Amino acid sequence: MCIRDRTNTSSLPNAYNVINNDLQLLQEWANKWHMLFNPTKTKYMVISNSNDVNNNQLVINNTQIEQVSSFKQLGLFLDDKMTWETHINHIVLKATKKIGLLWRVSLNFPRKCAENIYTTTILPTLDYGCSVYDSLSRRLTDRLEAVQRRAAVAYMY
């Protein structure tokens, strides 16, 4: 494998050319060492504030790699605008389902038991990765706080 000068990657089409060349070198390396890459499991994302339509494709082993606008990595949903919107939507939905379950069973348990259910199942859902997405917009922060209030109401009775 040779290392090339990467100073010409200032535009998106040039960056695609450099990456496709690197993918070709990677495929040659894999062939040499009898390794297989599964391009159907490979995805890529372009992180940008621009709304420009991207007609370029990345290719490995003569197969186009799928471009995605968001994906899950280590339990956090990342999106191409880095807004955390997709992640917050996911955890709000997940926590809301758990709160509904807590609401249904809390009538049969003492309050302390409901609090334990909250702290062991719902709170970790809301807290996981919070140090990473600490700088949320006010709207997304309000959505998370609304879920917390809903949970508090669920086990207060």
Image (cartoon, grey):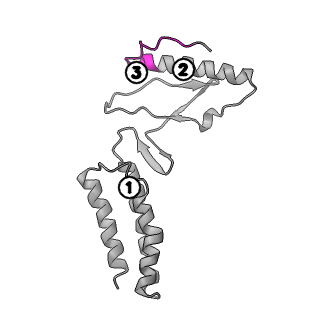
Callout 3: helix, strand or loop?
helix
- Judging depth in this view, the residue of 112 and 94 nearest the camera is 112
Would residue 68 be found to the left or right of residue 150 on screen?
right
Which quadrant, please, contains the N terminus? top right
* Residue at figure coordinates x 44%, y 48% from the top left: 77
Residue 53 visible in the displayed image: yes
Residue 52, disc: none
Q: Is the magenta stretch mostly helix, strand or loop?
A: loop
Which residue is labeled 1 in the image? 89
Q: Distance between the residues labelled 3 and 1?
A: 30 Å
Q: Earlier in the sequence, mark 2 or mark 1?
A: 2
Q: Is residue 52 above or below residue 141?
A: above
Cβ atoms under marks 2 and 1 closer than 8 Å: no
In the rendered image, which residue does mark 3 sit on?
12
Judge the density around disc 3: few (<14), some (14-19), many (≥20) Cα neighbours within 10 Å. few
| Element class at badge 1 | helix
**Residue carrying label 2:** 20
Q: What residue span does the magenta drawing correspond to?
A: 3-15
Q: Give how far across and how far down residue 69 sits, in percent.
A: 43, 39
